[in-house]
Image (cartoon, rainbow, N blue to C red):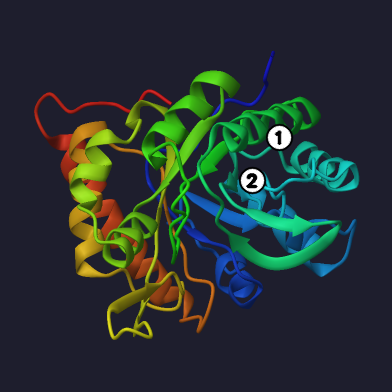
Amino acid sequence: MNLTSPITLPRAAGVCLKAEHYGDVLSGDRSTPFFEIHAENYFHDGGPAHRHLAAIRADHALSVHGVALSLGGLDDPDPLHLQRLRRLLDRYEPQAFSEHLAWTVHDGVYLNDLLPFPYTRAALDRVCAHIDATQAATGRRLLLENPATYLRFAHSEIPETEFLAEVVARSGCGLLLDVNNVHVCAVNHGFDALAYLAAFPLFAVGEIHLAGHARNVDTAGNRLLIDAHDRAVDPAVWKLYEAVIARTGPVPTLVEWDNDLPTFATLREEAVRAQSRLDAVAAAPGAAHAAA
């Protein structure tokens, strides 16, 4: 498949773009190398959101992050959704486009959540077919994000890292590595996050996500982390991030903060923390470089 628009985000730290922060960005921010938007928030044709985004896009790189394609679902991607997505991508020509390894739609009903599924051979075929359809419809390479999950399926046949590697090999997509999701899953399911990352197909990573998580307990009293995106990045996630970029070199990194939004200055402080780590890796002798 001849895919246009390779991943060309700057190898630097960006932040999510929220309507509450339009004014801060448009008042003269030049320190943020790129912003990321949720695609579905801009599926309409006009209005203030598009005016603001067009002005911001003129001065900044852009990543478009989808949340509703339901790549892991039983239904094929909705043709109307793909049409709207293509129109948005053509309009703003982002430097990256990503989606989740999850399902969100069943029998035409959108469930407003990113839901897990068992990693079986049938699921692998289905996800690859859905990514093929998406990349064909948009003409762009997709970055697939590893999920945050709160349960595992007894009849999964394939470890998650192997599942992702096979999807990359078969579809030609890239990966979005959400380091917070790795930590959340490691705690919730009791595995070693560093061992997971050692098996992760880092060669395919075109973007990294960082975010905060909430702490809770399950009905058995065990520690449970929730991918809440409502606070600063946890120290444990920073350590995992450092371990990743020590292997990959600088990779475009996005700080997510979707709930209990802070001031834009606070959000930028998180990006500065990520940037300092990227700069340190870039300055290290013999620094590696991501291949995606």
Is residue 132 found left or right of 243 in the rendered image? right
- Residue 106, located in which quarter of the rendered image? bottom right
Estimate the x, y position of residue 190 in percent, counting from the top left.
25, 61
Q: Residue at x 46, y 81 (%)?
A: 262
Q: Quadrant of the N terminus?
A: top right
**For this rendering, which residue is in front, 251 or 214?**
214
In the current view of this chain or complex, which residue is farthest to the left?
Answer: 285
Please identify the residue farthest to the front as the structure is shown: 155
- The residue lying at 64 percent from left, 26 percent from top is 5
The answer to whether residue 117 is above or below residue 271 is above
Secondary structure category for the residue under label 1: helix
Q: Is residue 3 above or below residue 195?
A: above
Write down the residue under mark 1: 130
Q: Nearer the viewer, residue 84 or 113?
A: 113
Q: Residue at x 35, y 73 (%)?
A: 225
Would you say the residues marked 1 and 2 are in contact, meaning their CB atoms lie under 8 Å apart?
yes
Q: Position of residue 193 (x, y in %)?
A: 23, 52
Residue 74 in percent (x, y) is at: 74, 45
In the picture, the disc for residue 72 is: 2
Please state the horizontal and vertical placement of residue 75, each as a whole percent of the image: 79, 45
Which labelled disc corresponds to residue 89?
none
Picture quadrant of residue 183: bottom left
**Image-based side of 197 in relation to 146, left or right:** left
